Image (cartoon, helix red, strand yellow):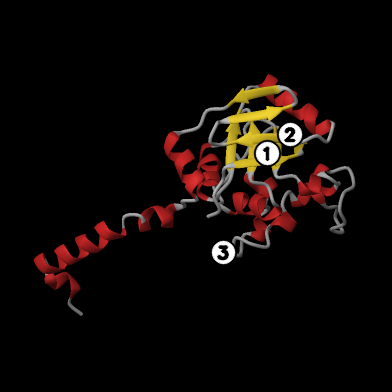
Amino acid sequence: MKKFTTLKSIPAYLPIVNIDTDMIIPKQFLKTIKRTGLGKNLFFEMRYDEKENPINDFILNNDPFNKSKILVAGKNFGCGSSREHAPWALLDFGITCVISSSFADIFYNNCFKNGILPITLKEEEIKEISEYSNRKEEILVSLPDQTITFGNKKINFEIDGFKKKCLLEGLDDIALSLEKLENIVSFEKNIKSKKPWIFND
C-alpha cells in the first residue's frame, strides 16, 4: 500500500448526501477481484448516459476535476453494502482523500485499508473548502500535521492514531501481519514441538 503523507489538489465537490457504495461502483462491476481497472466505472450511473457517453455536467468528467485527488462529498458517504470495490474504484480513479461531514463505518474503515484518507469535518468547514473547488484552486492536506490548508486558513481534523500510523507507513492488513512474522514463525515451531500430530499428513 502506498504511503500517505501530504496531498495537494483541486478538490472535486459532489454535494450529494447518502451516496451509497452502489452509486460509487455499481454491482455489475463487482465480478473482478483486481483492484485496478475500476476507476473508469466510478459513479458510473452519474457519469454516463444510457449509451455510456460521458454526461457533460458531471464534475468528474470535466477538467481539472477529472484529475482531482480530493473528493468533497455530502454527509453519510459510503453507506449501503460493505463492498471493498468502492474504495478500489476511488483509488483507481486517482482519489486518495475523501472529505465529508460523516461516513458509513464500514466504508470509512475500508478506506484506511486501501490507502485512502477519509476526513470528517463540520458542515461549515465543508462549505469553505467547496469554494476552492468552485475557484479551481488547490488545497493542501497534511496527514502528519492533521491539517487542511486553503488560502490563508488552516483547519485541523481528527484521526485515530493507529489508522494514521497505517496510512503514514503504508500498512494494510497483510503488511501488519508480516510485521509479526517472527512471532508467527516462533509460535508455529512451538506448537509443532508440543502437538506434532496437528501437522501429520
Query: Badge 3 is on which residue?
Result: 33
Query: Badge 1 is on which residue?
Result: 19
Q: Residue furthest bottom?
A: 201
Q: Are marks 2 and 1 in contact (CB under 8 Å)?
A: yes
Q: Residues within 10 Å of mark 1 (few under 14, many from 20)?
A: many
Identify the secondary structure beneath mark 2: loop
Give the quadrant of residue 118. Answer: top right
Q: Is residue 33 left or right of residue 92?
A: left
Which residue lies at the image location 64% right of the left edge and 30% below the top edge? 148
Q: Residue furthest top?
A: 124
Which residue lies at the image location 39% right of the left edge and 52% below the top edge? 176
Identify the secondary structure beneath mark 1: loop
Q: Residue 107, position in %: x, y?
A: 55, 42
Identify the secondary structure beneath mark 3: loop
Quarter placement of the C terminus: bottom left
N-term-proximal mark, 3 vs 1? 1
The answer to whether residue 102 is visible is no
Q: Residue 168, position in %: x, y?
A: 50, 44
The answer to whether residue 176 is visible is yes
Query: Badge 2 is on which residue?
Result: 16
Q: Residues within 10 Å of mark 2 (few under 14, many from 20)?
A: few
Q: Amino acid at mark 2?
A: Ile
Give the quadrant of residue 156. Answer: top right
> Which residue is at the front of the view, 17 or 157?
157
N-term-proximal mark, 3 vs 2? 2
